[in-house]
Amino acid sequence: MEIDIPAEIAGLPLLPLAFDRQQRLVEPEQVDAVRDHLARAESTDLLVLSHGWNNDAADALQLYRQLLTNIGEQAQGPWDDREVAVVAVFWPSKRFADRDLIPGGAAELSGDVPTAVLLAEIEDLRGSFDDSSLDRLRELAPQVADSREARRGFAEAVRELVEVGDDEEVDDEIPSGFFSTDGAEMIEELGVPREEELAAVGDGGGREGGIAVVGARGPTDDAARGGAAFLGSAFAGIRSGARNALNLATYYTMKRRAGETGRGGVAPVLREVRRAAPDVRFHLAGHSFGGRLVAAAALGENDDDPALPVDSLTLLQAAFSHHGFAENYEPGKHGYFRNVVAGSRVRGPLVVTHTHNDRANTWAYPMASRLRRQRAAMFGGPSDPYGAIGSNGALKTPGAEFGELLPADGDYHFGPGEIHNLESSASIPDHGTVTGAEVANIIISVVEADYR
């Protein structure tokens, strides 16, 4: 690890598990440390946390620190009868360039993004992708605005970044045009928003719930202006199209990598730890693509041999399909994670926070839709076949109930096998703000729930 991991945060023991791009433990002895601690401390519960889109381990640690500090402050009394340890998962994620997700943040740019911005974002991917493809992208970036051949070469290098694997959800989500469209045409298409996209964003309140909608409170003038900038000046021009192509490759690769790390890395570790500590209750919680990672860990290494039943699963603005747990969301087609709920792989509650404040969770949909020719009015909303669970909750999922994220002192009554979609606009203003006292209250509630 490149950073110093504290032994505890807010009185909660912190045990790191770091994985590389091949889902291997960077330090295999970390498993021994988890197992030994559970035996020595007589732990009753193990909370496994996973970050999502983060530039480095320091960002992930900051998220863990903020969330655990709030958990510690909220749980001073109720956890006196439980011994809770925390596993902090670190995996090689990389978020896409998200300056445009800040309303007005990209509006200062006039037209296309500068070449320097594109070059800086290519360099920012070092360590997450193979250097040879990044070197090629860096070589072509200064030429893409003026040369269609450079655009074709840039597109081919971007396509090489997309990792290939056995992940039906990711494979289904990648538009065929991402690989089949002429590279120059793809970059040009991604660099020029269609008029109906801008109209849909500006319409805001008339839409069913996509990127222009700001939670239950409805869009404000500021939000509408930010939305227009999001699909307007920030995404206008050839270099912007090149950056959008790069962002799509990053998005799909990190989404796949999260699932592979969950199934191929975290799941076998949990199986090993469970053998040594059979009475400890396991609670998995993940943010963004970390939500996909922990859902994949609960699914297990393969469909016939799950790693273990976990005791709760909490998804904080998770970045995967709102049909992830669905049954027959299309005739004869179930969600990729359907067996998590259908196979009783979560003994206690499954909790999902969701809000249309979360623009990061809808970012890929308008981008990919340009290659699908999808209707703009559907972007990110419940009718979007590619909508996110962090935006809309778990849809077409039998037994799923819709409620609201409660205040920090709210009282949840979670039971065995229940699925709770919590609309969270009042407390979660954007994709990354998932460490507050209201979210801490969810974690405490699932740990304390009596469902065995």
Image (tube, grey):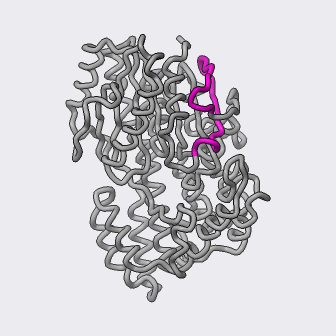
Residue at image location 57% in from the left, 44% down from the top:
428
* Residue 186 sits inside the magenta stretch: no
Q: Is residue 188 above or below residue 262?
A: below
Percent x, y of residue 209: 71, 52
Q: Give, as a single range, the part of the protein colored magenta.
A: 406-428
Position of the N terminus, as image quadrant, is top left
Percent x, y of residue 202: 72, 67
Q: Residue furthest bottom?
A: 146
Residue at image location 45% in from the left, 25% down from the top:
283
Magenta stretch: dominant secondary structure: loop
Left or right of 27: which side holds 277? right
Q: Nearer the viewer, residue 125 or 86?
A: 86
Residue 345 appears in the rendering: no
Q: Is residue 68 above or below residue 347?
A: below
Residue 450 appears in the rendering: yes
Percent x, y of residue 135: 29, 71
Asked where in the image residue 399 lies, by quadrant, the reply is top right
Q: Is residue 79 above or below residue 26?
A: above
Left or right of 293: which side holds 388? right
Left or right of 294: which side holds 409? right
Percent x, y of residue 336: 56, 39
* Residue 418 sits inside the magenta stretch: yes
Q: Nearer the viewer, residue 38 or 264?
A: 38
Left or right of 387: which side holds 435? left
Residue at image location 45% in from the left, 41% down from the top:
290
Q: Nearer the viewer, residue 166 or 346?
A: 346
Residue at image location 70% in from the left, 75% down from the top:
195
